[in-house]
Image (cartoon, rainbow, N blue to C red):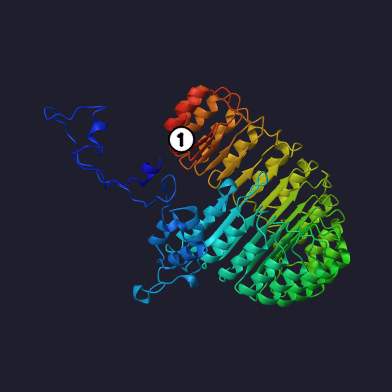
Amino acid sequence: MSKVISFTGEDFYPGGSLYPNPKEANLFLSLGHQAGFYYPLPKRSRVSVPFDFSGEWFVQKPKTTIESLPDECLFEILRRLPVGQDRSQCASVSKRWLMLLSNISKNEICINEKEGGDEGYGDEGYLSRTLEGKKATDVRLAAIAVSTASIGGLGKLSIRGNNKSECGVTDLGLKAIGCGCPSLKSLSLWNVASVGDEGLVGIAAGCQQLQRLDLINCPTISDKSLVAVAMKCPNLSELSIESCPNVGNEGLQAIGKLCPKLRSVSIKDCSGVGDQGIAGLLTSTSHVLTKVELESLTVSDLSLAVIGHYGISVNNLVLNCLPNVTEKGFWTMSNGRALQKLKSLTIGSCRGVTDVGLEAIGKGCPNIKYFQLRKCPFLSDNGLVSFAKAAPSLENLQLEECHRVTQFGFFALLFTCGAKLKVLTLVSCYGIKDINVKLPEVFPCVSLCSLSIRYCPGFGNSTLALLGKLCPQLQNVELNGLEGITDAGILPLLESSKAGLIKVNLHGCVNLTDKVVSSIANLHWSSLDVLNLDGCKKIGDASLKAIASNCQVLSDLDVSRCAITDTGIAALAQGNLHSLKILSLARCASVSNKSVPALKKLGRTLVGLNILACDRLNSSTVIKLLEHLWTCNILS
């Protein structure tokens, strides 16, 4: 074995004997002159890697490549690449190269001044990217950080995790965005539990043009992140924080102190936020802050007092589910006299809203135009009317689940706001009962153009007939789930409209018949644009014939769960409905394959067709219909 190892090939002679002693060769063959043997020339060994012969066996030494360089050396090489295609191509070599490139900030890039400096680095922020569910990973963020710099720059980034599975985005991915996307102006994080302060601090350090920040259900983010954003991002103008239990007063105080351009703030379900945080936020931004939204917080009357004293620029205020706020808080807020510019006010699930508090709001906020009240159990007719008298600019009023408001308060409101109220909405107000009331022969509510009554079971024919006399300028009528009304109640309302109805929604009014639809078609054919009859079980083919003959400007028709048949669909197709874009026939049990020719004809103008659960339309027919109406979005 030692001779084999020590063999170097120097004793090998082409054409000669392999053995130094010819007698040894005779043991195997004869070397007579009559025998001709051919000995080929030895081939040169093609060894590209050096060998070590010191051991018992040949040992191959490892190859030396760029991958063997440590990260520090590779970083120095990659940071000398120009921004653009070269960097993108190098990022596709391996995950390691991608992550290294994504962590090179703009200030760390070395570019020869003769090549034009950093002109290729996009600071405009034209691009928008959204990552959802499993697609939200650090690798994708790194790729975005590297690729967007040379094509306009990333301006908006939205990351939406999935509650069912852990999001793949961590602090590493956000730090890559911070390094590679200095043009970022808007960042939204939804359900991203794996991102903490380190990632957001990286964003703050690198994306100092940030103007909007949304943090929704990010449990590991704390005040440290908000302080960093406040210190590095002075242009922040919109802040939304929801379900972040580690965010508290310190972070909000820093935002209020260091972000002088803050215009909109929304704080929801953050258990660490108290009166001190809200006070610090509003006292420092009082001259620019226009929108404030507080929901599901443990703040007290003090926070509302601060709003009433410092909210001199606030025009949109939302207060939802504030259990510790009492009647005193609303009274104090209104008497602070700072909310003179307030135009939109929404209050929901606040037990402190009483008749006294609501009257004070009307007096202290004289320019309110939009007012929504939800789930206020202590509000009665007296408070509603007092507010209406004190709010001379009110144009849009919505009441939802205010069960102490009755029919008397409803009509008193119409009399009080007759010259200004444009939109009135009642939803699930069970205190309204159908009572006969005598009214003067006047038209006190000439400004009301939109009326919506939804799921108020006590609303009946008498109340509806009175509305017809009081509101002659109605254009939009929405009556949903009112099972107690019949043709006798709604016909006076339809006949009294002088302005012409544009949108009519009678969803769930099960006792209406074809007579109502015929009246609508005959009286408002020149203005009717949307008609919803979903769930009106007594409406049939006669209604479709009346619509086909008159409603030439109708664009949206819903007759789902109605008693229509193939005959009605055929009549509809023969009409002059050249403007019809959306048709819904869902759950119409009598519509069969015979309606396919009519549907094909209607489909020339349709962009949406709903034939869901039409059981007499078999699958093969539906497939043919899909092929024929390929430009129409068909729900089947």
Residue 184 visible: no
Q: Is residue 620 above or below residue 221?
A: above
Instruction: Quarter of the image for the N terminus: give it.
Output: top left
Residue 629 visible: yes
Secondary structure category for the residue under label 1: loop
Q: Is residue 132 above or below residue 534?
A: below
The residue that appears at 48% across and 57% down in the rendered structure is 98
Viewer-proximal residue, 399 or 134?
Answer: 134
Q: x, y (%) of residue 624?
A: 45, 27
Viewer-proximal residue, 613 or 357?
Answer: 613
Instruction: Quarter of the image for the C terminus: give it.
Output: top right
Q: Is residue 406 above or below residue 618?
A: below
Viewer-proximal residue, 272 or 575?
Answer: 272
Q: x, y (%) of residue 528?
A: 56, 45
Position of 628 with respect to 260 (left or right) is: left
Viewer-proximal residue, 159 or 118?
Answer: 118
Position of 502 with respect to 310 (left or right) is: left
Count of residue discs? 1
Q: x, y (%) of residue 584?
A: 56, 35
Q: x, y (%) of residue 580?
A: 50, 40
> Residue 283 occupies which quadrant of the picture?
bottom right
How busy is the neighbourhood of tag 1: few (under 14 within 10 Å), some, or many (20 plus)?
many
Mark 1, residue position? 603
Position of 109 with respect to 406 (left or right) is: left
- Amino acid, disc 1: Gly
The residue that appears at 64% across and 47% down in the rendered structure is 162
